[in-house]
Image (spheres, rainbow, N blue to C red):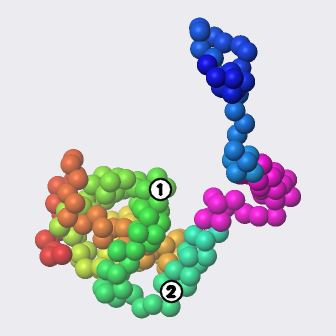
Amino acid sequence: MSTQTQDQVRDHGFDGIQEFDNKLPNWWLWTFYLACIFAFFYWVHYHVLDTGALPAKELQQEQEVYSAMLAEQLRKSPVNDESLTKLMSDPVTVKKGEAIFKNPAQCATCHKPDGGGLIGPNLTDKFWIHGGKPTDIHKTISKGVAEKGMLAWESILGPVAVQQVTAYVLTLRNTNVPNGKPPEGKEEPN
């Protein structure tokens, strides 16, 4: 071996393997040092002083702003077949409606979490007792059906939540879940 290579090899070895003792490149060392400094200030800013919002908190704040804006739009918009059909294509509205629907103290009690119907009718087929148009579904949810034992949910949930539930129920139509209740009412086209 040459003298130059011999100087770079460490004195110790393991299983006959020796390693070089080369210095790391300066650009790598500076990158490492700057990352450590950045990490310290990041930790102080976000965790010690709590002067910045972490990404999960920022996302939650943005979703709350979006939800408030959407709720304001829903309050101002007229309730008609076109607006309700448009709502069912908004994933945030449908997700909120699904959360309300699947709450055991609300819709899921009578219609099952999948909408297949338990005490209440099956919402996943194309048969509807009180009409299958979006405005009919909205009216049934908001005003209720006293003779069938369905509450008027608008006074409990509010008009925005009723529109969200309506959007979710519209996504359930014609999905025909297994073990759903037999058809009731008359067949409605999409």
Residue 20 to residue 86: above or below: above
Kindly identify the residue that appears in the image at 22 percent across and 70 percent down: 129
Say whether residue 169 is left or right of residue 152: left
Q: Which region of the structure is painted magenta?
A: 31-60
Looking at this view, name the residue that lies furthest to the top.
Answer: 15
x 78%, y 49%: residue = 33
Residue 92 visible? The answer is: yes
Instruction: Identify the residue at the far front of this view.
Output: 2
Residue 70 located within the stretch drawn in magenta: no
Image location of residue 180, percent across then percent down? 22, 52
Q: Quadrant of residue 132?
A: bottom left
Compare marks 2 and 1 and give the one earlier in the sequence.
Answer: 2
Q: Say if residue 144 shows up in the picture.
A: no
What is the three-letter code of the residue carrying label 1?
A: Asn
- The location of residue 61, given as percent across then percent down, is 65, 69
Please give the name of the residue rendered at 50% of the width and 86% of the height, measured from the top-left corner: 73
Q: Is residue 11 left or right of residue 44?
A: left
Q: Mark 1 = which residue?
A: 103
**Residue 73, which numbered label?**
2
Toward which corner of the image does residue 51 lie, by quadrant? Answer: bottom right
For residue 64, above or below residue 102: below
